[in-house]
Image (spheres, rainbow, N blue to C red):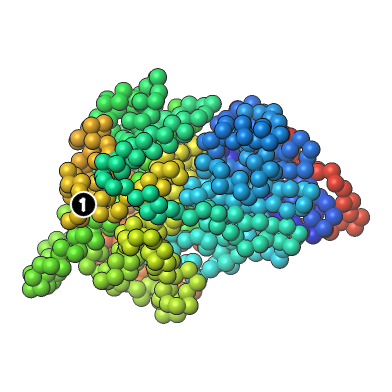
Amino acid sequence: MCGIAGIINPSEATIDPQRLSRACDLLQHRGPDDSGSWIDQRSHFSIALAATRLSILDTSDAGHQPMLSTDGQSAIVFNGLIYNYRELRRELQSAGATFATDCDTEVVLHACRIWGRDALHRFNGMWALCYYDATRQSGFLARDRFGIKPLLWSQHHRQICFASEMPALTAISNGCDEINPESLTHYIRFGYFAHPNTIYKNAHRLPPATSLSFDANGAHQPEKYYNIPLNTTPFDTPEEAAIAIRQSIGEAVARRRVADVPLGAFLSGGLDSSIIVAHLAQQSTQPIDTFSIGWDEDHAYDETDYAKLVSQEFGTHHHALRAHFSDILDIIPNMLDHLGEPFFDSSILPTAMVSRLARNSVTICHSGDGSDELFGGYWRYLAHGFLSRYQKTPALLRKSLERFAPLFLKNSKSNRLGNAVRQWQKLLRGGSNPLQRHLAWSQILTPQWRNLLLDKHDDPTDENHANDPLQILSSIAANQPVPDNLNAIMTFDLQYALTCDMLHKVDLASMFHSLEVRVPFLDPDVVRVAMSIPSAWKLDGNDNPCKDHAGNGKHILRHAYAGLIPNSILNRSKKGFEAPIGEFLRHDLREMFRDTVTRSTIESFGILNYDAVESIYTEHCTRKGEHADLLYALLSLCWWQQNRSSQQQANPPIQTDHRPEHADHSQTPTTPSASPKTA
């Protein structure tokens, strides 16, 4: 596991080694065990690669990066892990490759050298990488199928820069300074930046399952190498599907046990993490380490009793952190500084805390991310069925409920009843089209406050919008072999909300503490099985044959694990892993919010209405509305903007790489810091 960065310069300009050193400094938390950089300066083409390493496999110096082939003509920087690397290693040995390490990075290097971009189809794992072939003066960037590992890039003139995180990218690249108003509009509506966009016009997020080739002419168009399979092997019965689910998840967990360092698992006491822990316990001869976090002040946010129950069931060595809300408040400034881009999801805070707890004992943790998108775990999926039944009730009763219920029941996330009202109101604002309805439910900006965005940026879903979510979602629905709008919606979330919000959050929070997180539910075989199951078997529909867990999502998954997971866990409703950020904004964070979300900062973006911000905050503080996600998104945005302004004043612009008066276009690579290992 690593942080990677690089500069690709199709010109005679030399590359300043200090730029690589700066990138390594900014990525040190991703790889505290080792770092290195390498420059190859040639006639009309130069490339510089840098990496920081978190040692997972072959923890000796042999795994140092950047890594070169024995002839010095191929190089790679690689962030991630390939779980089937030993099988690929044997196949590559048959093709004539020789190996000096037991590191998967060397396997990836030889695979890219022999198979080119076709190697990406063979990898089972998570990765972001840059491969370079010096003989052809070309190469490619690539990201794993589901975007578990991040990769950002920019191109200024023909110079390409890339990095694992935004601070490193902006430190080494030119032109990453102008804010993208289209991206900012999407952020205000949904809370995250959807790939390929970032906060900057000239910085891009490489989408999942995508490669980007480069050569002396610069970057080519990104190319997708994998599409999520839909309904490829439909099952005849739920029992047949349940067997396939349990087998594929078990095999995925087994593949992810490969490591030369200690590993464990996050354990919330929910269904998904319990499934992962159950498989790990079955496959391990020693008790595995599990980690959870709970809050002394409010048991509504505390799942540690359920986690303890699962730990006892499977005999884990459990670590439970009993924390105070003050602990969350203490880490907010550091996390906001760390983000590199604005980010709305405040659950990054407890995620960072449990990651810090885990890193005291292990280097790797398994997580249950991806299950909700694959098997229908979120309320917004169940809501389609609820809305259908609600619309069949008498119109007079519906109108009475919609008119009078909000007068007596307040919209809130802080208690179960208030949260139900909040979700119900979101449900009613959706349209009749299930695709449009899903996007309406997914937004953090409610329709009554659309004036937060100035008129010229009011509608990002018109036909001229370059990345219209509705068009993307409609395309996914149209390409399904069997019409199934809910599976199309889950597929959309798998590619966008999961990647750009959930996985982004987990990567930022865990790697901040040098912890690798593995995601068994996002194994390609698990995804293939899950997306072959009709949504009616996943959700609470009239034609769902799995009626033993009514009222909850993920029916087929619960059905698959009946008899292994305790019933008290199997029948639990989903509970988010979060903190009471809405209450914090009303009280503890009030001063920070006022100092940060100021009129001058809001108006500096040119597309936001400060008077609307004031009204939204007042409505939230007086409990006339619940706007925690939107307000925290604005806090993060303004904090980022103020930091950016301070850094621009403190740091002069990057000097353009210069053309030496007497350039020596040597074929010999230069090494400004640690020497690269050859493979």
**Residue 327: x and y, percent?**
37, 41
Q: Residue at position x 26%, y 45% from top?
A: 237
Q: Residue at position x 87%, y 48% from top?
A: 666
Q: Which quarter of the picture shows residue 368?
A: top left
Quick one: 100 or 306, which is closer to the camera?
A: 100
Left or right: 220 with respect to 187? right
Residue identified by numbered label 1 = 544
Left or right: 244 with respect to 413? right
Quarter that holds the N terminus: top right
**Residue 358: x and y, percent?**
42, 32
**Residue 449: x and y, percent?**
32, 72
**Residue 492: x and y, percent?**
40, 59
Quarter that holds the C terminus: top right
Residue type, numbered disc 1:
Asn
Quick one: 501 or 20, which is closer to the camera?
A: 501
Q: Residue at position x 71%, y 48% from top?
A: 132
Would residue 302 be seen by someone viewing this image from the given angle?
A: no
Q: Mark 1: few, some, or many residues within 10 Å (few <14, many ≥20)?
A: some
Would residue 436 be seen by someone viewing this image from the given angle?
A: yes
Quick one: 263 or 117, which is closer to the camera?
A: 117
Spot the residue most to the top.
285
Q: How many marks?
A: 1
Spot the residue most to the right.
662
Q: Residue at position x 33%, y 30% from top?
A: 278
Left or right: 90 with respect to 318? right
Say which element carries label 1. Answer: loop
Spot the residue most to the front.
236
Q: Which quarter of the picture shows residue 569?
A: top left
